[in-house]
Image: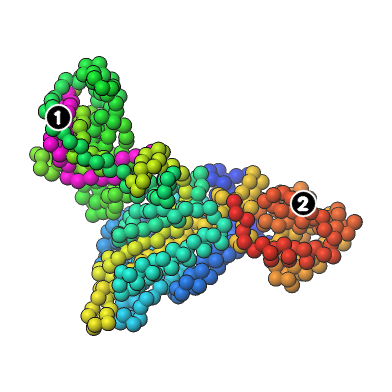
Amino acid sequence: MPLRMSSLFLRTLREDPVDAELPSHRLLVRGGYIRRAAPGIYSWLPLGYRVLRNVERIVREEMDAMGAQEVHFPALLPREPYEASNRWTDYGPSIFRLKDRKGADYLLGPTHEEMFTLLVKDLYSSYKDLPLSLYQIQTKYRDEPRPRAGLLRGREFVMKDSYSFDVTDEAFLQSYEAHRNAYIKIFDRLGLDYVIVKAMSGAMGGSASEEFLANAVNGEDTYVRCSGCDYAANVEAVRVAVPPELPYDDVPAAHVEDTPDTPTIQTLVDHLNDAFPRDDRKWAAHDTLKNVVVMVVHPDGTREPLAVGVPGDRDVDMKRLQAQLEPADAEPFTDTDFAAHPTLVRGYIGPGVLGAKNPSRIRYLVDPRVVEGTRWVTGADVDGSHVIDLVAGRDFRADGTIEAADVREGDSCPVDGAALVLARGIEMGHIFQLGKRFAEALGLQVLDENGRLVTVTMGSYGVGVSRAVAALVESSHDAAGIIWPREVSPADVHLVATGKEPEVYETAERLTAELETAGLTVLLDDRRKVSPGVKFTDAELIGVPTIVVVGKGLADGLVEIRDRATAGRDDVPVGSAADQLTRLLRQDPSPPSS
Ligand code: ATP
Ligand code: MG
């Protein structure tokens, strides 16, 4: 049955919704695909639900093809498994929690590692049962701090999540590779322009992970790729290129100098060049070591100050810092915090008071570029003075390193040293090498070939299914509306009948029936009292990639085939239109790539 615009549950809007900033959000609401129910929570209307199911179909076909088996878990889950993995606490305010009538704790699943682990533990016990990959396409709940951009960052959203179970690490790597390849097929079929980048594992723990990012100017993720090799990483996961250690036998002893009124790096550098000019070159911001103190808030609420030392020409990137500290959070150090730590002299904080071994016991982590032998100007912990020629390894030692300095275009690649390029993307998928974290926490063991109990090695793999709907619109739209890739379009053909003559509508009905017989889905604009202008505007907004117009040309026996993406138009005899369309859409089942 065609979708008839005369009765379709659809109201397109001419005005942008006030809360919508991104094209995908605007166009999906205006095109009658989704409606907001609450912040970050959306209802799917008929056209939107068709697109969503098309994305699901692609995901399902590729997961089935790689041998994963589909299951379906509840979204309403008991607390205990999440307690056992520590994620009841680690997720902090990001999970929706609720109580049943008896007062027992429940949550709405943000992701399902625990439940899958327990299910497999429940039923399997031998190496002979593995490898195993299970998946589901299911609604997830996360109380995101900043729900944003419609479907892109929802508080309720649809995710495909899968989990692999293996006896050995080698076998696991095969499961991981199989998932990675399935993801490549999925995102190729969706027609997204994407990159695979190294990523952080966040609350998931585990050893390594990769993200599939759709290139998008409006993406929330920033990633780097190397101009020389294939290194690519989410900015949060970038490892800086560590310089070699330097000899420091010739470096004079560190000396404290008066540097009045130099609380910022720029004022300090200017003062150094005035009062302590160098022979070889001018002092620069990168000669200084900037120590930034933050308050780390652990999931259980405990607070702990942390000092981060970065070269003075860089800032601490809070997103990078937070990614390193997860599941803990980092907050700015407040006036009250400074008052409680009088050894910290704001603007003049130095390694003299930092580190577990110093009286303040404030943990001190430095940028990996602060290697042994590097020479710094930094705070002397006294108002208006700095210490010069302070050598790392000789004069101070941090408690460790941390990747928290901002990453810039042109920074060196950690693999081959070539310049890094920055770009933005939307995270579409994420694949994790979980290792044994969940299997250990929940006791998932099987007997190996020698009859010994071994802990199972797991992987976890997610695709943002509802997010994909929005990401596709971000990557494929114009001023007039959406341009769907064929594979996910709500219909194959949008057939627009224009005019008053009954013949137009009869022909449109006949052509629709022919197309449907040939296996194509048709969105038929059979509205009688609507002007052609409104119909065309709607067709462009809705974004079915092939539009067929039955109207004026019919007097000459012609209908018009329009390509939504290229705006190309072609008049064809009405008698051969169905054949031509079928051939056109069959020969090019793949979506037009952007
Ligand atoms: P993000 O960094 O964007 O918050 P995440 O790393 O927390 O995502 P994962 O736990 O890796 O997300 O979830 C797997 C996939 O689910 C993500 O790659 C993304 O496509 C999708 N996803 C995650 N959070 C949301 C959300 N709030 N709304 C829509 N899709 C989401
Ligand atoms: Mg992720």
First along the sequence among labels 2 and 1: 1
Question: How many discs mark residues in the rendered view?
Answer: 2
Q: Mark 1 points at which residue?
A: 250
Q: In which quarter of the image is the N terminus?
A: bottom right
Tell me if residue 592 comes above or below residue 289 in the rendering. Answer: below
Q: Which residue is drawn at 18% across and 39% down?
A: 372
Q: Can residue 280 be seen in this view?
A: yes
Q: How crowded is mark 2: few (under 14 residues within 10 Å), some or many (20 or more)?
A: few
Residue 338: x %, y % from top left = 20, 34
Q: Residues within 10 Å of mark 1 (few under 14, many from 20)?
A: few
Q: Is residue 51 left or right of residue 162?
A: right
Q: Is residue 38 visible?
A: no
Q: Residue at x 44, y 55 (%)?
A: 196
Residue 265: x %, y % from top left = 28, 27
Mark 2 vs mark 1, CA separation in Å: 77 Å
Majority secondary structure in the magenta region: loop
Nearest the viewer among 586 and 511 is 586
Q: In this view, does 113 lie to the left or right of 261?
A: right
Q: Quadrant of residue 405?
A: top left
Q: Which amino acid does label 2 sit on?
A: Arg
| Magenta run includes residue 402 | yes
Nearest the viewer among 169 and 98 is 169
Residue ranking furthest to the right: 555
Q: Which amino acid does label 1 sit on?
A: Asp
Q: Are marks 2 and 1 in contact (CB under 8 Å)?
A: no
Picture disc at residue 438? none
Picture disc at residue 569? 2
Q: Which residue is drawn at 17% across and 28% down?
A: 389
Q: Which residue is drawn at 28% across and 67% down?
A: 436
| Magenta run includes residue 452 | no
Q: Give the range drawn in magenta.
A: 385-408
Give SS at disc 2. strand
